[in-house]
Image (cartoon, rainbow, N blue to C red):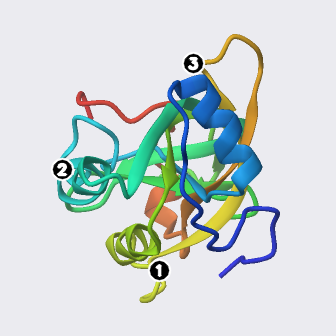
Amino acid sequence: MHQHCLCPASPFPPIRSPSLRHAIIQIKQAGRPLVFVYGTPKRGFYNYDAYLKAAVDVDNAAFVAAGQTAAEYRLVVGGERQIPFLLANNSNIGAEDEEDGKRKQQRHHRISGEIYAIKAESVMWGLDILEGVQTGFYYRECIQVEDLDGENETMFECWVYFKKSIENHLLGLPTIPAYTSLH
C-alpha cells in the first residue's frame, strides 16, 4: 500500500463551522482526511447508500465538493458487475489486440467524482473493506484533486482507490472521464 504522501493519516478533530466554504478551509487546516470517490460510492449509486450515506447522516463524513483529478488517469468499466476501475499511470500503457498483435493505447482523462471529509476512522476502514484493500484488489494512494464547486482553483490532497492488479482485458477497454448511471 502506498502510505507515503502528504495526506493526513488519521487526525479526527471536530469541525465547527457554519458555512461550507469555511468548513473546507477548516478541513484543510485541521488535516482531516479527504477521500475522492469516482464510482459506486458517489451519490446516486448503490455503494453510497451502503457506505457513505450512513456516515454522512450521523456526521462521520461530509460531502465537500465535486472534484476532478489534477492529473490524467485511465478509468474503465468492466468485470462481471460492470464496475469502474481506476488504473494508475504506472501500469501497462496498452493491451495487445488479439487479432493483429498491435498495442492499443488508452486515453487518459482528468477523472470526475466527489470529495468527502472523513470524520471517523471507521468510515475509512469501511471504504477499505468495500474496495478490497486488505485482499489486494485495490490500494489507496494520495493524489491532487481540484475542487470544482469553488470560485477559484482549490486543490486538495485526497485518498483515492486504484486497481492493484491490472488484467490485460482492462487495458483493452475504452476509458471514460466519469462514471455515470449510463454505465
Residue occupying the point 70% across, 54% down: 30
Q: Amino acid at mark 1?
A: Val
Q: Is residue 17 left or right of residue 108?
A: left
The answer to whether residue 110 shows anywhere in this view is: no
Q: Is residue 147 left or right of residue 123?
A: right
Q: Residue 27, position in %: x, y?
A: 64, 46
Image quadrant containing the C terminus: top left
Which is more N-terminal, label 1 or label 2?
Answer: 2
Determine the image quadrant of residue 4: bottom right
Which is more N-terminal, label 1 or label 3?
Answer: 1
Residue linked to disc 1? 133
Relative vertical location of residue 42 with respect to residue 94 in this rendering, above or below: above
Q: Amino acid at mark 3?
A: Asp
Q: Is residue 119 left or right of residue 127?
A: right
Q: Residue 98, position in %: x, y?
A: 48, 58
User: Whole-Å distance between the Cαs marked 3 and 1?
Assistant: 30 Å
Residue linked to disc 3? 149
Residue linked to disc 2? 49
The answer to whether residue 127 shows anywhere in this view is: yes
Give the secondary structure at mark 2: helix
Residue occupying the point 42% across, 89% down: 135
Q: Amino acid at mark 2?
A: Asp
